[in-house]
């Protein structure tokens, strides 16, 4: 008994900061099984063999035997639930995801999306993984659909991702994908989602300042909302990611001009002349327009 208690204590201490619940459940069941083995063991434990009181040793097995059947039945039911919830059901859901992905790649999007919708209705600990897989399959289908058919797919992605970031506010990928979804709705269907895109992508950047995934989409969102201050901060990051794209320099020079930062606008235009001589004429024309 002391060994089981020590094992539980050591295990919980080692996993105090763990966020992965599945290994916790699995090892906990192994410890429960070991505990059950000790309870059902008819042989006296080493501690018991050292006790001289024979009457106490005779009474102890009787007490354990009294609760053996209900404890065994309860643990058996829990074990069945565990096998179904954390083994068989996830395998079935993963099978549906793989089938849906294959169907989407073969341009059978409606069948694929119906499979994902059915899988999503089965609640499990894989829900968040399933939702992201659903959005990935929607993205595959977006490439094959006409513009008119893309709207309801984007709205479905919006619904799934909004629910995801609501339940998992620190999920960076959820905020990134949601911001991209808002951008596409605004650019393709004039939905009033540009400010939502800014908020989602800024949240992703706040959660992970070193990640650059959000920079291109954040530039699009700032441009859609005429947020020149945001563009002045974000375009230099985009230039670091894509230093060979002259349009980024030209856009940054224009942003500095709109903000009244004439010297920065001039320096950026001179950079264009130095790095991209083929655009020298356009850059010189821009310089003449500066005060």
Image (cartoon, helix red, strand yellow):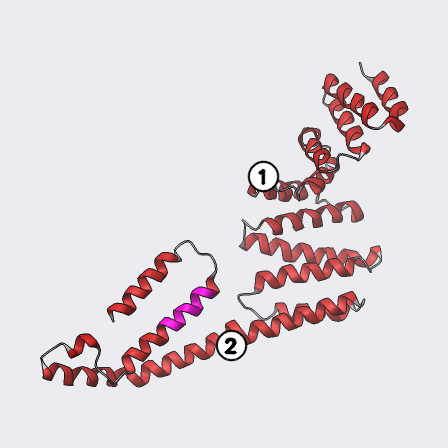
Asked if residue 113 can be seen in this view, the reply is no
In the rendered view, tell whether residue 70 sits above or below residue 216. below
Q: Position of residue 61 (x, y in %)?
A: 20, 84
- The C terminus sits in image quarter: top right
Disc 2 designates what residue?
84
Between disc 1 and disc 2, whose residue precedes? 2
Tell me the quarter of the picture where residue 141 sits. bottom right
Left or right: 240 as drawn, with respect to 166:
right
Left or right: 72 as drawn, with respect to 198:
left
Magenta part of the chain: 23-31
Q: Position of residue 108 (x, y in %)?
A: 79, 69
Tell me the quarter of the picture where residue 212 sits. top right
- Nearer the observer, 157 or 31: 31
Determine the residue positioned at 69% across, 59% down: 136
Q: Are marks 1 and 2 in contact (CB under 8 Å)?
A: no
Q: Position of residue 38 (x, y in %)?
A: 28, 78
- Nearer the observer, 88 or 42: 42
In the rendered view, tell whether residue 122 sits above or below residue 64. above
Q: CA distance from mark 1 to mark 2?
A: 40 Å
Determine the residue positioned at 28% across, 66% down: 5
Secondary structure of the residue carrying tag 1 is loop
Tell me the quarter of the picture where residue 43 sits. bottom left
The disc placed on residue 100 is: none
The disc placed on residue 209 is: 1
Within the magenta stretch, is there residue 98?
A: no
- Nearer the observer, 128 or 2: 2
Q: Mark 2, residues whose alpha carbon is within 10 Å: few (<14), some, or many (≥20)?
A: few
Within the magenta stretch, is there residue 24?
A: yes
């Amino acid at each position: 008994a002391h060994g089981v208690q020590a094992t539980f204590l050591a295990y919980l201490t080692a996993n105090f900061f763990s966020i992965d619940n599945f290994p916790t459940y699995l090892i906990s069941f192994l410890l429960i099984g070991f505990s059950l083995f000790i309870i059902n063991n008819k042989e006296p434990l080493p501690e018991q063999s050292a006790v001289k009181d024979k009457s106490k040793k005779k009474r102890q097995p009787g007490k354990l035997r009294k609760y053996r059947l209900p404890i065994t039945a309860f643990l058996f039911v829990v074990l069945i639930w565990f096998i179904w919830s954390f083994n068989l059901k996830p395998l079935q859901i993963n099978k549906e995801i793989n089938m849906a992905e294959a169907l989407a790649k073969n341009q059978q999007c409606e069948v694929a999306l119906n499979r994902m919708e059915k899988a999503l209705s089965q609640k499990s600990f894989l829900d968040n993984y399933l939702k992201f897989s659903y959005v990935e399959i929607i993205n595959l289908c977006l490439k094959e659909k006409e513009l008119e058919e893309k709207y309801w797919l984007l709205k479905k992605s919006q619904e799934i991702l909004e629910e995801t970031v609501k339940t998992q506010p620190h999920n960076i990928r959820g905020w990134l994908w949601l911001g991209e979804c808002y951008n596409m709705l605004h650019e393709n269907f004039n939905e009033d989602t540009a400010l939502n895109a800014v908020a989602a992508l800024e949240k992703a950047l706040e959660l992970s300042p070193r990640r650059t995934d959000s920079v291109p989409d954040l530039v699009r969102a700032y441009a859609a909302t005429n947020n020149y201050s945001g563009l002045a901060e974000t375009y230099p990051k985009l230039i670091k990611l894509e230093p060979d794209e002259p349009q980024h320099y030209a856009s940054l020079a224009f942003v500095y001009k709109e903000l009244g930062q004439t010297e920065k606008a001039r320096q950026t235009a001179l950079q264009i002349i130095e790095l991209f001589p083929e655009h020298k004429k356009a850059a010189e024309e821009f310089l003449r327009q500066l005060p």
